DNA sequence: ACTCGGTCCTGAAGGC
DNA sequence: TGCCTTCAGGACCGAG
């Protein structure tokens, strides 16, 4: 499930394959993912050079030399596949583009053939992902970006902001942390992990948590994300796979997916419980998380 | 304004 | 060549 660290890892993996390169041919193989693709997306991508790859929350933003930005969300199951150039593809001496990549497979929804023959494929079985194109100059006024709270690893996310954002909230802290308007980029896994690190129960009402405990969440969130990015970075560095798949990595979790197993807090005799909050599983230790 | 639950989608997993 | 149910999840959207 791509949350901020996974998206950042994907962004870093895509950089060498995309930045500074032109899209020789964009193949948009269905009319929509979660939402309809913008009109003429394939034509608007074909011929564009990618100047920069940015990340905002769980979105990857590709700034093009056409004045437009390609927004990509991986949803639940979205993956970016990178297939390196073959000796036979790219442009021939007449400037004609050709490629010998295998035919796209099931759930390959958007295929970008770069000018050097590299093929970038957006594959998303569940189609919770999204793509959009918008004028770069609109910046963060894009509908999906305008509602986002601060980046958890950025300067805008600090104790003062966080306390103010949670003040008076009746919703459980678990739900508040999943709310992208409060802080953006967290998903179910890292919310569970950050709460465990601070000893705060996911069931606590957000507005009722002491200032000291709220303050402790700030570095806990930052650290769990930074560690996951580091973990992703190292897996990326070692990454060598024939199909070029990129996007997921192994990371060890203290609570997520560990229902019934022993709590990893030193000297804690508890075991991990699972409860459902607003339709999502929360994993926590009800002995050391209060 | 705030909070909650429904919804989209497919594949994996598990019960029988 | 088994069928069926349940679950996973991000984020929008409508209901209360």
Image (cartoon, coloured by chain):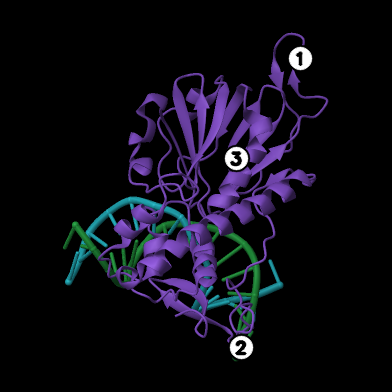
Chain colours: A purple, B green, C cyan
Query: What chain is tagged by disc 3?
Result: A
Locate residue A77: give its quadrant. bottom right
Q: Which mark is residue A203?
A: none
Q: Which x, y percent locates residue A142? A: 35, 36
Q: Earlier in the sequence, mark 1 or mark 3?
A: 3
| Residue that lies at the very extreme toward the top in this rendered image | A94
* A246, above or below A49, in the image: below
Say which element carries label 2. Answer: loop
Q: Earlier in the sequence, mark 3 or mark 2?
A: 3
Q: What residue is at 60 percent from the left and 40 percent from the top?
A: A11
Marks 3 and 2 share the same chain? yes
**Which residue matches tag 2?**
A269
For this view, does B9 lie left or right of residue B6? right
**Which residue matches tag 1?**
A92
Q: Callout 2 environment at 10 Å: few (<14), some (14 to 19), or many (20+)?
A: few
Say which element carries label 1. Answer: loop
Considering depth in this image, is A44 or A169 the residue closer to the camera?
A: A169
For this view, does A108 lie left or right of residue A200? right
Q: Earlier in the sequence, mark 2 or mark 1?
A: 1
* A157, above or below C16, in the image: above
Say which element carries label 3. Answer: helix
Task: Count up the numbered dots.
Answer: 3
User: Can the viewer see residue A78?
Assistant: no
Q: What residue is at 34 percent from the left and 69 percent from the top?
A: A206
Q: Which mark is residue A11?
A: 3
Locate residue A259: give its quadrant. bottom right
Distance between the alpha carbons at the discs numbered 3 and 2: 40 Å
Considering depth in this image, is B2 or B11 the residue closer to the camera?
A: B2
């Amino acid at each position: 499930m791509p949350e901020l660290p996974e998206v950042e890892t994907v962004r870093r993996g895509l950089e060498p394959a995309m930045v500074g390169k032109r899209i020789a041919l964009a193949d948009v193989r269905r009319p929509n993912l979660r939402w309809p693709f913008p009109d003429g997306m394939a034509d608007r991508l074909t011929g564009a050079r990618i100047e920069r790859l940015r990340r905002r929350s769980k979105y990857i933003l590709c700034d093009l030399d056409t004045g437009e930005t390609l927004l990509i969300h991986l949803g639940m199951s979205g993956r970016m596949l990178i297939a390196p150039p073959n000796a036979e593809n790219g442009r021939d001496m007449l400037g004609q583009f050709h490629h010998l990549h295998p035919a796209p497979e099931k759930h390959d929804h958007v295929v970008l053939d770069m000018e050097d023959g590299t093929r970038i494929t957006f594959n998303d079985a569940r189609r919770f992902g999204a793509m959009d194109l918008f004028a770069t100059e609109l910046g963060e006024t894009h509908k999906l970006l305008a509602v986002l709270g601060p980046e958890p690893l950025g300067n805008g996310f600090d104790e003062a902001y966080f306390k103010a954002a949670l003040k008076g909230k009746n919703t459980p802290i678990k739900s508040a942390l999943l709310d992208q308007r409060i802080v953006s980029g967290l998903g179910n896994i890292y919310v569970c992990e950050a709460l465990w690190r601070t000893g705060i129960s996911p069931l606590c009402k957000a507005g009722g948590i002491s200032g000291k405990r709220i303050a402790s969440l700030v570095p806990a969130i930052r650290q769990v994300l930074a560690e996951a990015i580091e973990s992703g970075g190292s897996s990326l560095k070692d990454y060598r796979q024939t199909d070029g798949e990129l996007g997921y990595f192994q990371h060890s979790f203290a609570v997520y997916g560990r229902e019934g197993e022993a709590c990893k807090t030193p000297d804690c005799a508890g075991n991990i419980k699972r409860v459902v909050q607003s339709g999502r599983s929360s994993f926590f230790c009800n002995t050391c998380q209060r």
